[in-house]
């Protein structure tokens, strides 16, 4: 126990010990996460390293955040340079990069104005606030209803949670926002029944992330577009997980051919620094005025400069082409695997947002993969989710799937043994 007396890593010079780090968290953190017993210390490209220097191939990318992998030289350089100049300035003043980033995102999306937040949840929160203002402007106080999808995930604040169509995230926190109606994904009838003149926004993920990688159909998205137009409601896409390149196009909506009025983005935008944004068409953006929304941290010079660098790297290194090509390879290999393994049922998604539906619990597979030096992620209990960095190559896919194949085979053997 003497270790804990000198327990600050780096000060006393002792080798940090995984168990001690885990134990300290058990004592001092709110117990909100069920972490894997792994302390990661550094990364390079598509690999991460633990305290013992053991290497892991990364199919998680910080839950879709580290699209440029780890320690990308251009990101490291941009952070170093900017941190030496200025990290934060209040939104009381202009900085060199916020407007440039807004301009870039508007050009890439075809939308007209941006607001910068610190997280995805806040981007959703701001989007709904904007939709309420725009709704009230054209339809009075009654035009405040929100329509969301069953099985969706939009974040943890009260607004975002109220739009999240999964009980496990909502339970215990009621009362939530009133005036939210949920419809099943791709159910045109239910959608038509839910949207009316009092609807101020339809909010959806074109590809469900936490919900288990389920895509909205183009037909459904087109109907959302038509209904939003007819009833002067905002069509809001949550592209926090599926956007900014993961589908092989810069915005997921460009893969589906349906343009929203407002799009929320976050995860990969600043290569790991906290930054989110929502982009809006002028018709909606003009509903807000000075003082009605704001943030202390959002849109600071460091995060915005790094986000510009992120977008430049994606363009200059042609990473969207890589996502499309290697994503295709990943899908084909997963299909082969599903064809051979009774434990793997279905492949969903596209590019670098894909899910493998298992017939067995996914978490044990994820845990066993740690021993094999591969990081996978699971969601919805039985879905293996792949959100790798955009730098992933075919050979990395092959390595990851060799491990997965072996683990699924072992799981089957263990089950057969238990049954006999
Ligand atoms: C992660 C996520 C959010 C929440 O973003 P945070 O940065 O965790 O607040 C919202 N919507 C989707 C689709 C997400 O994947």
Image: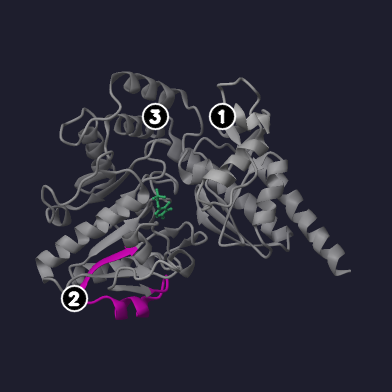
- Contact between marks 1 and 2 (CB within 8 A): the answer is no
CA neighbours of label 2 inside 10 A, class few (<14), some (14 to 19), many (20+): some
CA neighbours of label 1 inside 10 A, class few (<14), some (14 to 19), many (20+): some
| Magenta segment | 183-203
Which quadrant is home to the C terminus? bottom right
The residue that appears at 38% across and 44% down in the rendered structure is: 244
For residue 378, above or below residue 178: above
Q: Residue 394's x, y, as percent?
A: 60, 39
Q: Residue 161's x, y, as percent?
A: 37, 62
Which callout, 1 or 3, points at the residue further toward the start of the chain?
A: 1
Identify residue for label 3.
316
Within the magenta stretch, is there residue 412?
no
Identify residue for label 2.
197
In the rendered structure, the answer to whether residue 65 lies left or right of residue 359 reads left
Which callout, 3 or 2, points at the residue further toward the start of the chain?
A: 2
What is the spatial separation of the Cα atoms under label 1 and label 2, in whole angstroms? Answer: 52 Å
Q: Is mark 1 within 8 Å of ligand 1?
A: no
Which callout, 1 or 2, points at the residue further toward the start of the chain?
A: 1
């Amino acid at each position: 126990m003497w270790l804990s007396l000198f327990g600050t890593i780096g000060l006393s010079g002792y080798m940090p010990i995984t168990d001690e780090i885990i134990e300290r968290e058990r004592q001092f953190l709110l117990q909100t996460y069920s972490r894997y017993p792994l302390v990661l210390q550094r990364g390079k490209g598509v690999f991460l390293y633990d305290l013992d220097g053991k290497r892991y191939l990364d199919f998680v990318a910080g839950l879709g955040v580290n699209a440029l992998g780890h320690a990308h030289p251009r990101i490291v350089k941009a952070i170093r340079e900017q941190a030496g100049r200025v990290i934060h300035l209040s939104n009381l003043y202009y900085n060199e990069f916020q407007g440039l980033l807004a301009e870039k995102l508007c050009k890439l999306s075809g939308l007209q104005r941006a607001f910068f937040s610190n997280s995805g949840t806040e981007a959703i929160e701001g989007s709904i606030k904007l939709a309420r203002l725009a709704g009230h402007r054209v339809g009075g106080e009654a035009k405040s209803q929100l329509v969301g999808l069953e099985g969706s995930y939009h974040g943890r604040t009260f607004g975002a949670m109220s739009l999240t169509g999964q009980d496990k995230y909502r339970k215990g926190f009621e009362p939530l926002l009133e005036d939210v109606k949920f419809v099943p994904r791709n159910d045109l009838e239910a959608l038509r029944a839910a949207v009316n003149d009092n609807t101020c926004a339809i909010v959806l993920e074109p590809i469900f992330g936490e919900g288990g990688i389920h895509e909205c159909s183009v037909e459904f998205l087109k109907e959302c577009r038509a209904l939003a137009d007819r009833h002067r409601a905002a069509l809001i896409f949550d592209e926090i997980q599926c956007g900014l390149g993961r589908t092989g196009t810069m915005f997921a909506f460009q893969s589906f051919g349906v343009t929203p009025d407002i799009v929320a983005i976050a995860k990969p935008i600043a290569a790991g620094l906290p930054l989110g944004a929502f982009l809006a068409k002028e018709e909606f953006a003009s509903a807000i005025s000075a003082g009605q929304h704001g943030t202390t941290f959002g849109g600071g010079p460091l995060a915005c400069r790094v986000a510009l660098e992120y977008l430049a790297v994606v363009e200059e290194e042609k990473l969207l082409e890589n996502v499309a090509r290697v994503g295709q390879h990943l899908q084909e290999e997963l299909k082969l695997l599903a064809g051979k393994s009774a434990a793997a049922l279905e492949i969903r998604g596209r590019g670098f947002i894909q899910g493998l539906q298992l017939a067995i619990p996914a978490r044990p597979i994820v845990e066993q993969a740690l021993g094999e030096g591969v990081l996978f992620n699971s969601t919805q209990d039985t879905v293996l989710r792949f959100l790798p960095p955009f730098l992933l190559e075919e050979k990395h896919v092959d390595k990851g799937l060799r491990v997965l194949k072996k683990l699924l085979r072992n799981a089957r053997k263990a089950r057969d043994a238990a049954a006999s």
